[in-house]
Amino acid sequence: MKELDIHPPLVEALLTRFLREELASAGFSRAVLGISGGVDSALVAALCARALGPQNVLGVMMPYRTSNPDSEGHARLLARELGIQTAKVDISAMADGYLATHKVEDRMRRGNVMARCRMIVLYDQSVAFQGLVAGTSNKTEILLGYSTQWGDSASALNPIGDLYKHQIYQLSRHLGVPGPILDKAPSADLFEGQTDEGELGFTYADADRLLYWMVDERLTEEELVARGFELAFVRRIAARIAATQFKRVMPLIAKLSLRTINQDFRYLRDWGK
Amino acid sequence: MALAAAIRYTIPSMPLTDCRLTVAQTNPALGNLAKNLDEHVAAIEAACAAGSQLIVFPELSLTGYFLKDQTAELARGLDSPELQRLCELSRRISILVGFVERASDGRIYNSAAFLEDGRVLHVHRKVHLVTYGMFDEEREFAAGDEFRAFDSKLGRFGVLICEDAWHVTSGLQHFLAGVDAMLAPSCSPGRGVSGGSTELSSETSWRTLLDAHALLFQTWVVYANRVGWEDGAFFWGGSRVIDPFGRLVARIEGFDTATLHAKIDAPTLRRARVATPLLRDSKPWVLARGLERIAAQEQRP
């Protein structure tokens, strides 16, 4: 996938500066993130450790009672290698307090509740640690809308949100993310046996290539088919991107006044720093 | 032939001297005029101490770039205390500074002011505002409408603010006016990391563009690009000086604040224009006739 290849030292140089400078703009020098044992959070942890120093990074493990024990093992392996601080918050009681009481059985609803419990923990831990929550969503999953809104997608700043999954692996290898994390199949680990690719119904390799040509290079449907992509796949992904746009924007505000937030009241977040 | 007849080579009032200059690759604090002004003053003091006669700051160096609604709030006239403070310092060193200019008629421009000997010698208002992709300048700024070379005590200069340099007609006018150096302040965001390249695709484009300006227009090129992040977008730096043969003379490596010291000199300029006399052979009246023909064609129903 030559078209998707990055030069890892260049991207590392940029993203470590991004973390340092954007944290400083907000008045911080520390970061908190959930470490799931997967490659995305491993990469963000590694970037934060390099950018801020490992003592300024808190990796929080947040298992639910049905989580795969390998996930925590991989998270601990990562934290040891990086030398970052860790905390473990079992979200079972917290999640079940709602899920059991209200008899939530639906798999997607349960997964969303778990993801949002983890968000609550991270935002609270970030206050105690005096850091900001670093996001761990990559470009592929953000475009596919493969995340829980206000759950795992919630963060103060995200260093990897413009990197496709293929590029995540490239940079992770460069930064020395442990082999077992690189080698296993990506999974949200919200229910037993779940894998991203199984649930999505296509491979990351195919999705990455299509998204690159569709989004980054703005090829038309006809041009994508001419490049060898199946029309049905192209249409399915295009529809998915459009249908999940709500996850990529702030809530809509009904415009009434002469100056409405985010419409004609427009300032960067770095305003006044 | 009115247009063709209007084109005249003008003789600079003062030829280029050997000019020691500093490029300040800064990281302005977004919207914080007071802090940025202090940093300008510090950079100017340091450049004076280093023996420089000219210091070049990036585009919008006093304000930062993605200003959105801050633009109007930060607009300043040439008589503002901020500009006047820098004017005072220009008694010791010539200064090119980027700022949001509020004109007397209320229009707001993305401008660069050349300050020398305690006064504003020249103001260039960015002509080619950039409004596509990640940019929205035409929402905030009025566009300038001319490229005018000016004579400093150091030589004849022309200013190109960032996107101005992407339109060959901008540099061409400075070339025909016989500038010794093009000063190119910039806020170029870095982007394009795929394809396995070891450099950003934005840097590849700019390198080509700046080298071409030096080579085709046989001029010194002084590029001052900023660094730093604004809401997730970064500016890649890469400030540099290129000689009139198109050769890189000095460059700032990396993505951090830094200063560059270089000398631009008249003998190199003369040698380039003797070796390949492009200005002598430029035949601007052919261009003028061509433009008149194109304009006439466009007027047809």
Image (cartoon, coloured by chain):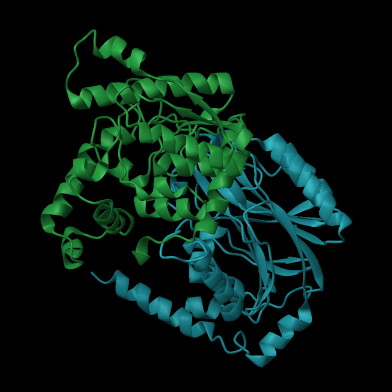
Front one among B210 and B118: B210
> Taking B10 as reference, is A225 above or below it?
above
Placement of the C terminus of chain B among the 4 image quadrants: bottom left
Q: Residue furthest top?
A: A101
> Taking A67 as reference, is A100 above or below it?
above
> Taking B182 as reference, is B116 above or below it?
above
User: Residue A185 at what x, y percent from top left?
Assistant: 30, 46
Instruction: Determine which quarter of the picture holds residue A206.
Output: bottom left
At horizontal 59% and vertical 62% (from top left) the residue drawn is B160
User: Residue A106 at what x, y percent from top left?
Assistant: 17, 22
Front one among B225 and A166: A166
Front one among B108 and B213: B213
User: Residue B73 at what x, y percent from top left?
Assistant: 57, 33
Residue B96 showing in the rendered view: no
Residue A123 showing in the rendered view: yes
User: Residue B299 at what x, y percent from top left?
Assistant: 30, 70
Shade representing chain A? green
For the image, the number of numbered tags is: 0
Chain the render paints cyan: B
> Taking A244 as reference, is A124 above or below it?
above
Q: Residue furthest left?
A: A232
Front one among B148 and A109: A109
Answer left or right for A137 relative to B265. left
Answer left or right for A102 relative to A32. left
At horizontal 51% and vertical 51% (from top left) the residue drawn is A176
Instruction: Determine which quarter of the picture holds residue A160.
Output: top left
Answer left or right for B17 relative to A193. right
